[in-house]
Amino acid sequence: MIDPRLQALRVLKEQGTVTATAEVLHLTPSTVSQQLRLLARDLGVELLEAQGRRVRLTPAAYTVLDHADALFAQWERAQADLAAHRTGTSGRVRFSCVSSALAAIVTPAAVLLREEHPRLTVRMSEQESEDVFPLLLARRTDIAVVIPTSDGPPPDDPRFDQRPLLDEPQDLLVPAGHPLAARGTAELAEASREPWIGSPDRGDQHHLLLTACAATGFTPRIAHHANEWFAVAALVAAGFGVALVPRLAPLPPEHEAVRVPLRGEPIPSRRIITCVRRGSDRQPAIAHALNALHRSAAERA
């Protein structure tokens, strides 16, 4: 087994504070601090430096982390090799995913797993994209289905294995009586003078809106804020503005809002990816779950 204190150091690098690290690991801050002090003592190097009320990793800590990432990836591969000696696929696989992916891709994949591997227990939870990476590091989830953000780890991060799952176009959502509602398609620039419904707390979605509009040549006038899709649809249906909505996002039928597919360049789209701990994709439960996800995504595409 790998020293659990290394896990605390890895999560600290991701979270930035001892308090946030303790929350992710379900420990107390004093326990995390003690683990890191003992680790530094046993290694004979300083791992942390005080920086106001926060701490900063030392160069020695980054050296330790480079080796720790390699150790954890190899341990995941070792678990996969050991699993090959067991018969049948059993155990547990845990998904953490953004809401639209949970509804449209992960739930159908879980149905496939239930039918094909009845001894495998599946757990699903909705999470924002930026919250899943500490959960993976802390081994509180196994597969993340998320949208890459500017704050997320790069594709070559040695701790994770990130793979494309689905490219999801955005639709323009307009009120039922809007002139664009009767059109089969529209260009984003045709809505440049409209008031917009923004979702600033959905960082990935809001950034996509601003980027897509900028690429088209205008800055959207954000008139109202809403984060849940049913609230966005209600505001649009009542004539308070238009919005960009992901193709997979379910909208309540009682709101009289119309999806208008976009044409021209660029068509705003977001990429949905899977992310697992590096080396864990060979473990049977996770491998079967990833396979089911890709089959479910292909069905949606």
Image (tube, rainbow, N blue to C red):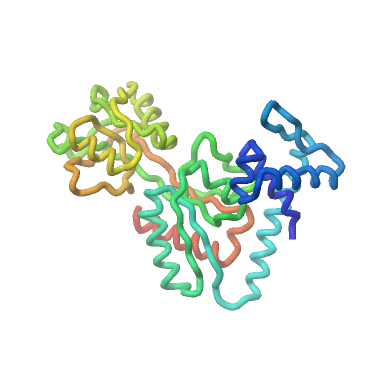
Residue 33: image x %, image y %?
73, 42
Residue closer to the observer: 23 or 40: 23
Residue closer to the observer: 77 or 129: 129
Seen in the image, is 187 located left or right of residue 27? left
The answer to which quarter of the image holds residue 157 is top right
- Residue at image point 69% right, 47% down: 8
Q: Is residue 141 above or below residue 206?
A: below
Seen in the image, is 205 located left or right of residue 184? right
- Residue at image point 50% right, 74% down: 119
Residue 295: image x %, image y %?
42, 61
Seen in the image, is 17 located left or right of residue 119? right
Q: Is residue 111 above or below residue 259?
A: below
Seen in the image, is 17 located left or right of residue 146? right
The answer to which quarter of the image holds residue 113 is bottom left
The answer to which quarter of the image holds residue 18 is top right
- Residue at image point 32% right, 47% down: 249
Residue 212: image x %, image y %?
37, 30
- Residue at image point 38% right, 26% down: 215
Residue 1: image x %, image y %?
74, 61
